[in-house]
Image (spheres, helix red, strand yellow):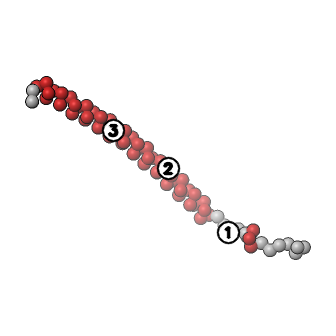
């Protein structure tokens, strides 16, 4: 292998490493954003579940269970 070939091989490796570093940084940013979104959704889900647990059963019957009024 000549010196020129070795230099070209080194430059190609450096280019690949730079591309991989950029890709890793992009993936890390995406993962960080997704983790933030997951945590936000978990908080929202807990809030909704607390609200649902606080609902009182309704005294109003479902429409399918309602008896027709006496004048029918």
- Residue depicted at 30% across the width and 34% down the height: 19
Among the two numbered marks 1 and 2 on one chain, the one whose residue lies closer to the N terminus: 2
Question: Is the Cβ of the residue at disc 2 closer than 8 Å to that at disc 3?
Answer: no
- Secondary structure of the residue carrying tag 1 is loop
Q: In the displayed structure, would residue 56 be above or below residue 6?
A: below
15 relative to 7 in the view: left or right: right
Name the residue: 53% across, 56% down.
Answer: 45
Marks 1 and 3, how far apart in space? 53 Å
Q: CB of mark 1 within 8 Å of CB of mark 3?
A: no
Q: Which residue is mark 1?
A: 57
SS class, disc 2: helix
Residue 16: x, y in percent?
Answer: 25, 34
Residue at which label 2 appears: 40
Image quadrant for the N terminus?
top left
**First along the sequence among labels 2 and 3:** 3
10 Å crowding of disc 3: few (<14), some (14-19), many (20+): few
Which numbered disc, 1 or 3, marks the residue closer to the eye? 3
Q: Position of residue 61 (x, y in %)?
A: 74, 70
Relative height, residue 21 to residue 72 (above, below): above
- State the residue in front, 22 or 44: 22
Where residue 5 sits, quadrant-wise, is top left
Q: Residue at x 17, y 31 (%)?
A: 9
41 or 64, nearer to the observer = 64
Q: Residues within 10 Å of mark 2 (few under 14, many from 20)?
A: few
- Sequence order check: which comes first, mark 1 or mark 3? 3
Q: Is residue 58 left or right of residue 37?
A: right
Please, what secondary structure does the residue beneath circle 3 have?
A: helix
Q: Position of residue 46 (x, y in %)?
A: 53, 58
Horizontally, is 58 left or right of 21 in the view? Answer: right
Q: Which residue is mark 3?
A: 23
The C terminus, quarter of image: bottom right
**Residue contact between numbered discs 1 and 2, judged by CB atoms under 8 Å:** no
């Amino acid at each position: 292998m000549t010196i020129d070939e070795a230099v070209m091989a080194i430059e190609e490796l450096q280019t690949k490493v730079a591309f991989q570093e950029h890709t890793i940084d992009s993936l890390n940013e995406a993962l960080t954003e997704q983790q933030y979104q997951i945590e936000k959704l978990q908080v929202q889900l807990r809030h909704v579940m607390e609200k649902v647990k606080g609902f009182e059963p309704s005294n109003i019957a479902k429409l399918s269970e309602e008896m027709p009024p006496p004048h029918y």
